Image (cartoon, rainbow, N blue to C red):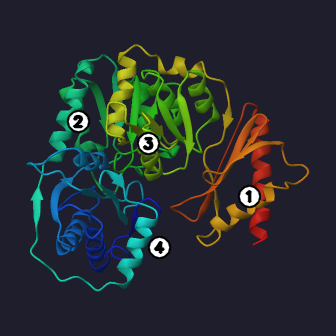
């Protein structure tokens, strides 16, 4: 059951994701899909095509026909749900990807009826798979579709106004699947680009494909310094982006502020890790700002519920409903950022206008799967009567873990839905106070853990 996670299915190839488990997943999933067609694509890992065959066997055995798109970025997989393919609109899609995880990992990101299939749906699927018998094999039923070309054509058409812009662009695909589409898009828009590690290679020979980790940005920073005006980096399946200028590594919440400048009083959803600066600045501009749970599936569902224009995670998941379909797409986010520059917006100058705050990166506290949610519950109880030396609490937001608002900032502790850790983050307008918040909340976590 450990492979069935909050947002997706994820595990180690052969050990956890093998012929038996994946055929079962396909068969069980088929019963959750109303229509006949499921679009399936995969990332650059060497075992992804093998898992495609296993999953197809299960889906076919469950009465579904597969639209096979081959090697694609995750956003291309999502894209298929909004278009007809030879008169067929799929009822669901599955992306076979290990995202930014080590090369021995793989997994499935599932969309049903244009909505993420996650949380209890995934857990229930896992329980069903653990008790069912292996389905009988049926005739393979796969129709190949060219989703990449349709996606590229769409983006090139949408961004014709960027054609030939002078900005020098450098980018790092990290040997993930972004390279399947980037060169063609940039070439057809006649952009001035230099790319690193464009060739998809699931062994990730140059660096780990996680642009939220500064260690993985060393090479693109060097190239930016000598050859670029702006830089982009992508994760393994191209649904997360890093944006770098000569002065800033622009996190997802600050990206949202920049993107929203060209929208008319949009509704913007952020996760609990987003800076208070983002929420305050959006409100000041007359926009509607909503704080919600971390997780790409959670944010997509909340966007549909509120009809929001934009959503973001600090880690670089950016979701556009404004002029797009409402899912996270790092390639589309790249072009929207270039559009801001094209329209005369100085990214660094706009960021310099914002209030100065001191914030930590995500800090992780190791625990166990069994304990992590219990610790959060205990922390909430302890906050009702905090220690005498605890910083003065203004209010508490418990939409996802606990975000404690203090006089000059905030602290967050939440349980990761994907790993056995607690995630913390701290922010203040006064650098020393951010450290005070960190120390106080870490002491609370330790006390909560010892009390279990």
Does the residue at mark 3 contact the one at mark 1 (Cβ under 8 Å)? no
**Which residue is drawn at the image coordinates 35% and 41% (left, top)?**
329
- Which is nearer the eye, 343 or 232? 343
Q: Residue furthest top?
A: 344
**Which residue is drawn at the image coordinates 31% and 43% (left, top)?**
197
* Residue identifier under label 4: 2
Pick whichever of labels 2 and 3 is earlier in the sequence: 2
* Residue identifier under label 2: 183
Could you classify mark 2 by the number of other residues whose Cα lies within 10 Å: few (under 14), some (14-19), or many (20 or more)? some
* Residue identifier under label 3: 303
Does the residue at mark 2 contact the one at mark 3 (Cβ under 8 Å)? no
How much space separates mark 2 and mark 1, taking CA atoms? 49 Å
Q: Between tags 3 and 1, which lies in front?
A: 3
Pick whichever of labels 4 and 2 is earlier in the sequence: 4
* Residue identifier under label 1: 380
Left or right of residue 272: residue 10 = left
- Which is nearer the eye, 115 or 365? 115
17 over 435 or under it: above or below: below
Q: Between tags 2 and 3, which lies in front?
A: 3
From this viewpoint, is residue 41 visible? Answer: no
**Which residue is drawn at the image coordinates 50% and 61% (left, top)?**
418
Does the residue at mark 4 contact the one at mark 2 (Cβ under 8 Å)? no
How much space separates mark 4 and mark 3, taking CA atoms? 28 Å
Q: Between tags 4 and 1, which lies in front?
A: 1
430 over 210 or under it: above or below: above
How much space separates mark 3 and mark 1, taking CA atoms? 28 Å
Q: Between tags 4 and 3, which lies in front?
A: 3
Left or right of residue 415: residue 80 = left
Left or right of residue 176: residue 436 = right
Assign a secondary structure to mark 4. loop
- Which is nearer the eye, 425 or 245? 425
């Amino acid at each position: 059951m450990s492979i069935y996670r909050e947002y997706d299915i994820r595990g180690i190839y052969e050990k956890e994701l093998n012929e038996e488990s994946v055929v079962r997943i396909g068969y069980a999933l088929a019963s959750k899909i109303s229509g006949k067609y499921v679009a399936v694509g995969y990332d650059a890992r060497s075992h992804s095509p093998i898992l495609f065959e296993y999953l197809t066997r299960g889906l076919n055995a469950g009465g579904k026909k597969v639209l096979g798109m081959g090697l694609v970025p995750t956003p291309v997989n999502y894209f298929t749900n909004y278009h007809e393919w030879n008169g067929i609109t799929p009822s669901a899609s599955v992306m076979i990807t290990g995202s930014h995880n080590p090369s021995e990992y793989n997994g499935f990101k599932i969309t049903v009826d244009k909505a993420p299939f996650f949380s209890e749906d995934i857990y229930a699927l896992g329980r069903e798979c653990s008790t069912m018998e292996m389905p009988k094999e049926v005739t393979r039923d796969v129709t190949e579709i060219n989703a990449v070309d349709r996606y590229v054509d769409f983006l090139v058409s949408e961004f014709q106004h960027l054609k030939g812009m002078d900005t020098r662009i450098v980018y790092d695909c990290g040997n993930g699947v972004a390279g399947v589409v980037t060169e063609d898009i940039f070439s057809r828009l006649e952009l001035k680009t230099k790319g690193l590690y464009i060739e998809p290679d699931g062994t990730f020979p140059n660096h780990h494909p996680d642009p939220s980790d500064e260690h993985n940005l060393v090479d693109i920073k060097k190239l930016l310094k000598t050859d670029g005006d702006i830089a982009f980096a992508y994760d393994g399946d191209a649904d997360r982006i890093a944006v770098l200028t000569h002065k800033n590594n622009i996190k997802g919440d600050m990206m949202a502020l920049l993107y929203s400048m060209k929208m008319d009083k949009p509704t913007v959803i952020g996760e609990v890790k987003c800076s208070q600066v983002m929420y305050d600045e959006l409100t000041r501009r007359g926009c509607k700002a909503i704080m919600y749970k971390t997780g790409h599936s959670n944010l997509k569902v909340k966007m549909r519920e509120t009809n929001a224009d934009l959503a973001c995670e600090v880690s670089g998941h950016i979701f556009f409903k404004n002029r797009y379909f409402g899912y996270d797409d790092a390639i589309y986010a790249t072009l929207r950022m270039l559009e801001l520059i094209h329209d005369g917006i100085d990214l660094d100058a706009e960021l310099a206008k914002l209030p100065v705050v001191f914030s930590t990166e995500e800090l992780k506290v190791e625990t166990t799967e069994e304990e992590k949610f219990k610790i959060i519950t205990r922390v909430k109880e302890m906050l009702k009567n905090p220690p005498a030396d605890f910083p003065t609490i203004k209010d508490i937001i418990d939409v996802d873990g606990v975000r404690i608002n203090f006089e000059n900032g905030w602290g967050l502790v939440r349980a990761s839905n994907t790993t056995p850790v607690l995630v913390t983050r701290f922010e203040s307008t006064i650098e020393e106070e951010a450290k005070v918040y960190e120390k106080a909340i870490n002491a609370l976590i330790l006390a909560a853990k010892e009390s279990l």
